[in-house]
Image: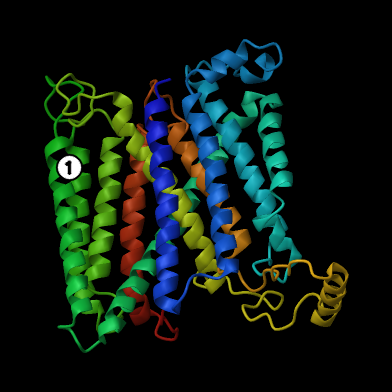
Amino acid sequence: MACLIPLASCVACQACTCVGGQICSCLCGLLSKGGPPSREKLAGRWSRVAYLALAIVTILTAGVFRDTGPQTLAGSDIFSKNMRCPDDNDSPTCMGRAFVLRVCFATAVFHLCLGLLTIGASDFSNPRVQLHTALWPMKMGMWLVLHLIVFFIPSSFFLGFGWVALVASIFFLLVQIVIFIEWIYEWNEAWIMLDGADNIGGPWHMIILAVSVACFGLSIGMTVVMFLWFGKNTADPAEEGGCEVYTFFTSFNLILFLFLTVFSFRATEWMPATGIMPSSLVAAFMSFKVLTALYAQTKCNALSGADDESIYKGPPEGLTAISVIIAIVLAAYNSVMISKAWEDGDLGLEAGPTQQKDRTVPLVPMDILDGQQNSQEEGAGASEPEQEPLKGPLGYNVAAFHFAFCLGILYVAMQLTNWNEDYKPGEVDKSRASMWIKVCDSWVLAVAYFWSMIAPKVLTGRNFDI
């Protein structure tokens, strides 16, 4: 099982991410509100951890058995008919890709159903929120049934579904860019306000400067790595050239983030939220996207290419594990961020009249609940008092969380299936399709960040305050 090592690393990394996220959330609650998070917030957080655990089980199963599981099941009398690929498909990885898409399809449908059932339910005053935070025996039964049903569906369906998953993954990346730009602006403004906009010598301004220098240093470092390790033809050393397009990607990325950084200083006149730190974070993220794009090809890849002189000499799956780890972390993080941004209205999806953040009118009259509670207490006598039921908002949009998780699991499926292209055993996310998607994703990020800076100047009639 060539993917066992990277996928195990992935699980360990994700576990640390979940635990670390919960610790950071609790610390933020202590610092900002003077106390621990409410029971409602804790219920929402641990529900998300449970869904992340289910996703890890799905991805671990898909990755570990991607290369060996399909052939084993194809030999079974029960699954053989549906596991085999169509006769006109002679791809050696057909069954493996269909297997990954099967289990990821089941998880995606699971979250899609929960998302549809919880639209408008982000507050404990709505009984449907229990579909998200409780009823785990029912949901686990549903999850298991879905993952069993998919093995009775022909592989041809999932090979076609792979193209739907590809489109959904690209959409997920685009939403990720919107959330990232919104986040860096809010981060920058929050730290500036801690000192005051005019106190440029304050400690938080110094921290902003330090973070910016570190991010620019990281961007330059990744650029140097790209020039050194992805500019020589390693597939055929005797052939001169052939790596010009990859050198262009590196050079163009350097020019882009330098231009955006210089322009951001000019844009601070009409867009105070921008500046050196948002530009440095964009530069680092752009460089990282291009670096992973160049790593996805093998023609000019001295780090882990096709020749015997590759720098990395360890197990081939060791480096590809990084791509899967990053995919899962991004999918999980963006699912949380998208649901939070949707609830706050940052995506332009404001709550309608039936879902306002201030829920002053409960769905059930409180006097009825009080009467029921008093009668229960009288009947209980001297029994132990019951814990007060949960009430109030969770702090994020439940439906948006499940919709985002549905897209996120399809994004990870594309990583494991090499974006619907053939792969070698142990390879993850190494194809020309992956390369072009990541390069274009970096360019879209640059365009979106540039537009966010010039939009207040161009669209003077709109309010762009964060």
**Residue lying at 61% horizontally and 41% vertically, measured from the top left:** 107
Residue situated in front as seen by the camera: 80 or 422: 80
Secondary structure category for the residue under label 1: helix
**Residue lying at 55% horizontally and 14% vertically, measured from the top left:** 71
Report which quarter residue 404 is drawn in.
bottom right
- Measuring from the top left, give residue 166's x and y in whole percent: 50, 41
- Measuring from the top left, give residue 335's x and y in whole percent: 50, 55
In what quadrant of the picture does the C terminus appear?
bottom left
**Residue lying at 21% horizontally and 89% vertically, measured from the top left:** 198
In what quadrant of the picture does the N terminus appear?
top left
Residue situated furthest bottom in the rendering: 198
- Measuring from the top left, give residue 136's x and y in whole percent: 69, 48
**What amino acid is found at the position of numbered circle 1 in the picture?**
Met
Residue 252 appears in the figure: yes
100 vs 283, left or right, is: right
Judge whether 330 appears above or below 464 on screen: above
Q: Which residue is mark 1?
A: 226
Q: Residues within 10 Å of mark 1 (few under 14, many from 20)?
A: many
- Measuring from the top left, give residue 392's x and y in whole percent: 64, 74
79 vs 95, left or right, is: right
Looking at the picture, the colour scheme in use is rainbow
55 vs 236, left or right, is: right
Residue 404 appears in the figure: no
**Residue lying at 41% horizontally and 82% vertically, measured from the top left:** 465
Report which quarter residue 193 is drawn in.
bottom left
Judge whether 368 appears above or below 97 on screen: below
